[in-house]
Amino acid sequence: MTTIDELLAEARAKLDRVRAEDLSDEVAKGAILIDARPIEERRRDGELERAIVIDRNVLEWRLAPSSEHRIVDVGPEQRVIVVCTDGYQSSLAAANLQRLGLLGATDLIGGYQALIGEEVKGG
């Protein structure tokens, strides 16, 4: 049996994760930003600028190249950065996206909370 910590470590070992301070540069270079937080958290904490909102429970169906329910045309090497609240769900989701053929999928270290913290530190 695999523990959740082992599953998370396995997922993250495959990802080139993004730091909060590097997110703007990644998006400027053409990365697709996906906000997978539930609506309640987006209302409470704020919207993520330049992000496509896709609820976590349908993320793979909306992005997988093989899915008939795909809403975003993403190439296999396209950088896709998944953001959740704290950076746990997004790691598992990005690893799943890689398994589905989106090799450029990754996530934001620390999630939206790290981004808020970076904005506060930055001034």
Image (spheres, rainbow, N blue to C red):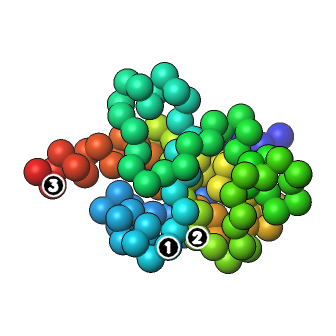
Q: Nearer the viewer, residue 55 or 93?
A: 55
Of callouts 3 and 1, the N-terminal one? 1
Q: Are marks 1 and 2 in contact (CB under 8 Å)?
A: yes
Q: How crowded is mark 1: few (under 14 residues within 10 Å), some or many (20 or more)?
A: few
Q: Which residue is rendered at x = 56% and y = 43% of the image?
A: 53
Q: Name the residue under label 3.
A: 122
Residue positioned 16% across, 50% down in the render: 121
Instruction: Tell me the crowding category of disc 3: few under 14, some 14 to 19, or many 20 or more residues within 10 angstroms, Cα based.
Output: few
Q: Which amino acid does label 1 sit on?
A: Gly
Indicate the secondary structure of the residue bearing disc 1. Answer: loop
Residue 63 percent location from the top left of the image: 73, 55
**Above or below — where is 45 with respect to 83?**
above
Q: Mark 1 points at which residue?
A: 30
Q: Position of residue 13 (x, y in %)?
A: 62, 64
**Residue, far left:** 123
User: For the residue marked with disc 3, what is the amino acid?
Assistant: Gly
**Is tag 2's residue or tag 3's residue first in the polypeptide sequence?**
2
Amino acid type assigned to the residue bearing label 2 in the image:
Arg
Q: How many marks?
A: 3
Q: Residues within 10 Å of mark 2 (few under 14, many from 20)?
A: many
Q: 111 above or below 95?
A: above
Give the residue at x 73% y 74%.
Answer: 76
Q: Residues under labels 3 and 1: Cα distance? A: 23 Å
Q: Is residue 37 left or right of residue 26?
A: right
Q: Left or right: 99 with respect to 14? A: right
